[in-house]
Amino acid sequence: MDLKKELSGLPESGIVLITSPAEEITKTNMDILRIITGGGIRGVYITVNHPYKTLIKHLERNGIDPDNFFFIDCITKTAGGRAERADNCLFIASPNSLTELGIALTQAIQMIPGDEKFIFMDTLSTLLIYNSAGTTAKFSHFLITRIKLLGLKGIFMSVENELDERLLSQIEQFCDKCIHIS
Amino acid sequence: MDDSGLLPVRVSTFDELIERGGIERGSTILISGSCGAGKSIFAMQSAYYGALAGEKVYYITFEETPGKIKTHMKTNFGWNVNAVEHEKKLVLESADPFKISMAINAEDEMWRMKGLLFHVDVMDRAIPSKVDRIVIDSLSALSAAFIDKDKYRLYLKILFDSLNRKNSVNFVIIESRQDLGFHSEANIAEFLSDGVIVLYNIRKDQVRERALEILKLRCSSHVMETIPFKITYKGIEIFPQERVF
């Protein structure tokens, strides 16, 4: 699949849901981020899977400049890690602090200069470990609507088969495009 | 200061939640919430920024000492309460709720008078001119001092009547249960008040999130949603555009 081609067709305030097999998700994430930031756009990276410190190293190893992002780290504090003050990261208490995540997102978007920005979420399916399917769907709808209202691009990653059918179809209907990587 | 008879609350974006942008003078508003929800911070933030805007504020505490309150407000939020007190814009005093209760119990037939005198006299002496904002922190401490709950209820009636006669906006703090959607036990204070602001400290597994709602406000229409807020180095920060999940 030509990811670059798939993503290039996305409208300015388009939302795309990308599902990928678990063993491919990290590589897929990096491929997507390379494509998006390659276009000179900066964005907010919401990480539910990798702590900020680990993620920075991972991005650098993959030749992606971390300066292209403002990070929202939902996992370091949950894992008992030390959330050291960082100029380009907000640390959330837990992936179930969705209210706090919403507030942090608004603040993070304001930290990025310019009009063209993106929101990247890694990964939506992990939210289900900490939240019910109903709450996850409600939050996803809120988030997607907020991103559309602000005229931004949204890329939501999910591990294949980790979202149940009902939740997946609910989220798919909020999105402009769904890409299933096999 | 607004001459229209409205006084802004001045706590972050709280006034945006009220259609008229403030609270009518002569109103007594209950600030209700569980332990650690931020009731005293809300009241002090309103008092402090009111004083900075040139209002005359009277804050009476039945719980923490004035010294402790000033230290905490300065350390946590950088609010120099001493400075506004020095400029005679804010008076922060403490009172012993047990003394009030004892005085009332000692002379039964005179208790109404004593209850009234305490509040009216102390407030009038503290601020000779007009009072714009009064804070009572808190009714729960007073309630605990009263053995006879009938007398407490009657005392509250007199207290609220005396507050409402002032041309000020009055905040009365009360502790309540913390569950979202269940703000307090039904009591006379809610019935007597012109408004109820509820602060929640919601537990979600290992973490807590804060939210507030305006449950009742006689002077204006207002938002009906539960709005998230945080306690930061600036005090209470309210996020009207956000939602509670």
Image: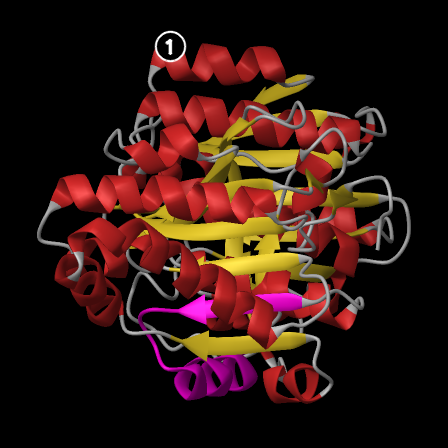
Write the residue at 26% across / 54% down.
B110
Does the magenta run of residues contain A112? no
Q: Which chain carries label 1?
A: A
Residue B94's spot in the image, x, y percent?
39, 77
B45 or B238: which is nearer to us?
B45
Image location of residue B243, percent across then percent down? 54, 34
Q: In the drawing, does residue A123 fall left or right of residue B18? A: left
Q: Is mark 1 on a helix, strand or loop?
A: helix
State the residue position of label 1.
Answer: A166
Q: What stretch is highlighted in magenta?
A: B57-76
* Residue beneath the point at 73% across and 48% down: B8
Nearer to the camera, B45 or A120: B45
Q: Classify residue A162 as left or right of residue B99.
A: right
**Quadrant where the C terminus of chain B lies?**
top left
How many numbered circles are shown?
A: 1
Q: Which quadrant of the figure contains the N terminus of chain B?
A: bottom right
Q: Does the magenta stretch include residue B61?
A: yes
Question: Front-most of A87 and A24?
Answer: A87
Q: How crowded is mark 1: few (under 14 residues within 10 Å), some or many (20 or more)?
A: few
Q: Is residue A173 above or below residue B233?
A: above
Up-down relation of residue B125 to residue A120 (above or below): below
Three-letter code for the amino acid on which mark 1 is drawn: Arg
Q: Which residue is drawn at 62% across and 70% down?
A: B234
Quadrant housing residue B182: top left
Please state the horizontal and vertical placement of residue B211, each as a whole percent of the image. 46, 43
Residue at position x 21%, y 50% in the image: B109
